[in-house]
Image (spheres, grey):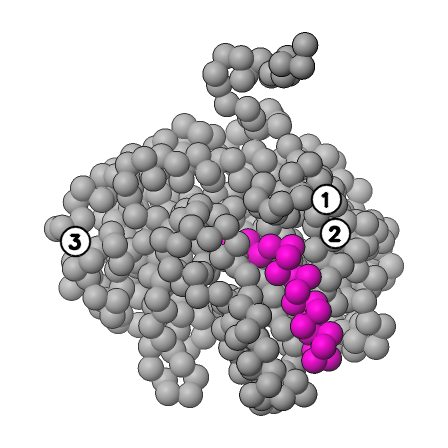
């Protein structure tokens, strides 16, 4: 009798085991363009997909930031915006949601993630202090450097290898971190800057085992541990799927346990929280909170709105609850994995294992004949747009910027083109179109040359740089 295992109808029919846990109530028509229109548009944009007009884009995979579809509940919440200058009802809803699902004590809302990064960097870093982290993120590192910090990468080596199948490529190398504590002295380390599902490594998660060990190491040296929680829900899902002992633990429980090993977190609500704008900073230490609550008034707005409208805080509070549901996150990551599997089957070089929010095409292996100084990942993004109107972005030498000391290009090992999947926005038919277009560009790869940079802004150059084909 014991052989009867329950099977869903989908399994019995040999079909998929999940589908989107929502149905579509409103649609936004897409515009398709001709090749001639796209050639004109990309030239006008200086071969930088950030400078394209969205009206000229068919499937927009530039970023998953602020591009989510909100639910009917979130839209209903927008109507309940309490636009009082101080003490808005919606602030208290947001505070309750962060306390309930992330577990931190004190909340400071900010207009988006970098607003929170600015505050924690200003409050937590003294000039000349080291800030070790698991690979850099563009805005995070910039704010750390602008506060006088020296970012040091302490991620495990596997993270820099796009073909390594390590299940937790976001992990911190504890030996590298301890060596830094010893070499520089823990008093010269501002804090450890830990990010969930490391974006620049391809959306790679950190294990629970790693964060527990980190906590222990930081306690031993008296160093604080802060978390970039931007895509922590996706990280929690990977722990559920890959780490021993968590297979039947709800994602919400895993998220809260992970956060409990850290002293505070900053958040871009534009990612996990399913909203178009918003962010926050949350800490457990009252004294630090007082300082942050004071700083936010200078840069963002009063500490009960931080640059957000009441309605935006309400949408975020509701989005937090939706984001930690197992059904939601399984479908969200499932769609990314679906696209990744198509490309893997067609032997397109992408970062493996496929991460939680995006596909990262390995431009070094895609265009082995284009040297890194001729921006192969930037060119790949332009070629994809030319082929089909799909918008992606560069995550390689342009994003890495210049070394603040030497002024030279930083040459990251990873030269990637990112196709980021917005949450609850596109269907699997769109994913099929994307895979087919990448395949077309791949077939043409030998005829493609690199680019020359003709305009370079000083800060975060990837957003506004301009290029010309060689
Ligand atoms: C987007 C992002 C940020 C910055 O947040 P914004 O809301 O864009 O200002 C910080 N860290 C990570 C990992 C991100 O992906």
* Whether residue 354 is situated above or below residue 12 in the rendered picture: below
> Is the CB of the residue bearing disc 1 within 8 angstroms of ligand 1?
no
Q: Secondary structure at mark 2?
A: helix
What residue sits right under mark 1 in the picture? 252
Instruction: State the residue at coordinates (72%, 77%).
Output: 220
Q: Residues within 10 Å of mark 1 (few under 14, many from 20)?
A: some
Instruction: State the residue at coordinates (33%, 77%).
Output: 409
Residue 448: assigned label: 3
Q: Give the image location of residue 206, x and y in percent.
A: 58, 56
* Whether residue 240 is situated above or below residue 142 in the rendered picture: above
Mark 1 or mark 3: name the one nearer the start of the chain.
1
Magenta residues? 204-226
The answer, for residue 276, to whether it is visible in the render is no
The quadrant of the picture occupied by the C terminus is: bottom left
Q: Secondary structure at mark 3?
A: loop
Question: In the image, which is nearer the foreground, mark 3 or mark 2?
Answer: 2
Identity of the residue furthest to the top in this view:
1
Is 33 in front, or is 374? Answer: 374
Circles 2 and 1 in contact, beta carbons < 8 Å: yes
Mark 3 or mark 2: name the one nearer the start of the chain.
2
What residue sits right under mark 2 in the picture? 256
Q: Give the image location of residue 131, x and y in percent.
A: 58, 78
- Asked if the stretch drawn in magenta spans residue 214, the answer is yes
Q: Give the image location of residue 337, x and y in percent.
A: 46, 38
- Asked if the stretch drawn in magenta spans residue 171, the answer is no
Instruction: State the residue at coordinates (12%, 51%).
Output: 447
Residue 331, quarter of picture: top right
Is 451 in front, or is 82? Answer: 451
Q: Give the image location of residue 454, x and y in percent.
A: 26, 71
Residue 168: assigned label: none
């Amino acid at each position: 009798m014991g052989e009867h295992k329950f099977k869903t109808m989908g399994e019995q029919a040999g079909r998929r085991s999940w589908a989107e846990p929502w149905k579509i109530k409103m649609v936004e028509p897409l515009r398709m363009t001709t090749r001639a229109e796209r050639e004109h548009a990309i030239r006008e944009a200086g071969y930088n997909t950030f400078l394209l007009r969205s009206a000229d884009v068919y499937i927009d995979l530039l970023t998953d930031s602020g591009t989510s579809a909100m639910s009917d509940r979130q839209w209903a919440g927008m109507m309940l915006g309490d636009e009082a200058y101080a003490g808005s009802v919606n602030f208290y809803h947001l505070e309750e949601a962060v306390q309930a699902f992330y577990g931190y004590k004190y909340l400071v809302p900010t207009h988006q993630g970098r607003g929170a990064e600015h505050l924690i960097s200003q409050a937590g870093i003294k000039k000349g202090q080291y800030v070790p982290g698991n690979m850099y993120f563009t805005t995070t590192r910039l704010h750390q450097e602008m506060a006088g910090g020296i970012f040091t990468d302490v991620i495990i080596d596997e993270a820099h290898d796009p073909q390594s199948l390590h299940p937790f490529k976001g992990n911190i190398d504890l030996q590298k971190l301890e060596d830094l504590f010893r070499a520089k002295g823990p008093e010269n380390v501002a804090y450890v800057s830990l990010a969930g599902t490391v974006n620049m490594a391809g959306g790679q998660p950190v294990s629970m085992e790693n964060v527990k060990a980190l906590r222990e190491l930081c306690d031993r040296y008296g160093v604080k541990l802060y978390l970039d929680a931007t895509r922590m829900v996706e990280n929690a899902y990977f722990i559920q799927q890959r780490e021993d002992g968590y297979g039947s633990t709800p994602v919400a429980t895993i998220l809260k346990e992970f956060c409990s090993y850290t002293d505070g977190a900053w958040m871009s609500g534009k990612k996990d929280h399913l909203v178009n704008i918003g962010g926050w900073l949350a800490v457990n230490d009252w004294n630090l909170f007082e300082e942050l609550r004071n700083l936010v008034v200078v840069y963002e707005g009063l500490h009960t709105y931080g640059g957000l409208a009441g309605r935006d805080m309400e949408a975020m509070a509701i989005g937090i609850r939706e984001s930690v549901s197992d059904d939601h996150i399984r479908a969200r990551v499932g769609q990314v994995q679906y696209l990744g599997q198509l490309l893997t089957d067609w032997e397109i070089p992408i970062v493996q294992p496929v991460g939680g929010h995006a596909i990262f095409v390995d431009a070094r292996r895609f265009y082995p004949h284009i040297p890194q100084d001729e921006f192969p990942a930037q060119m790949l993004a332009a070629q994809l747009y030319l082929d089909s109107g799909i918008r992606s972005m560069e995550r390689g030498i342009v994003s890495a910027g210049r070394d603040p000391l030497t002024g030279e290009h930083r040459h990251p090992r990873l030269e990637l083109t990112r196709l980021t999947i917005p949450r609850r926005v596109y269907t699997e038919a769109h994913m099929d179109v994307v895979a087919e277009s990448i395949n077309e560009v791949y077939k043409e790869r030998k005829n493609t040359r690199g680019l020359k940079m003709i305009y370079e802004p000083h800060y975060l150059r990837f957003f506004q740089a301009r290029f010309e084909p060689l």
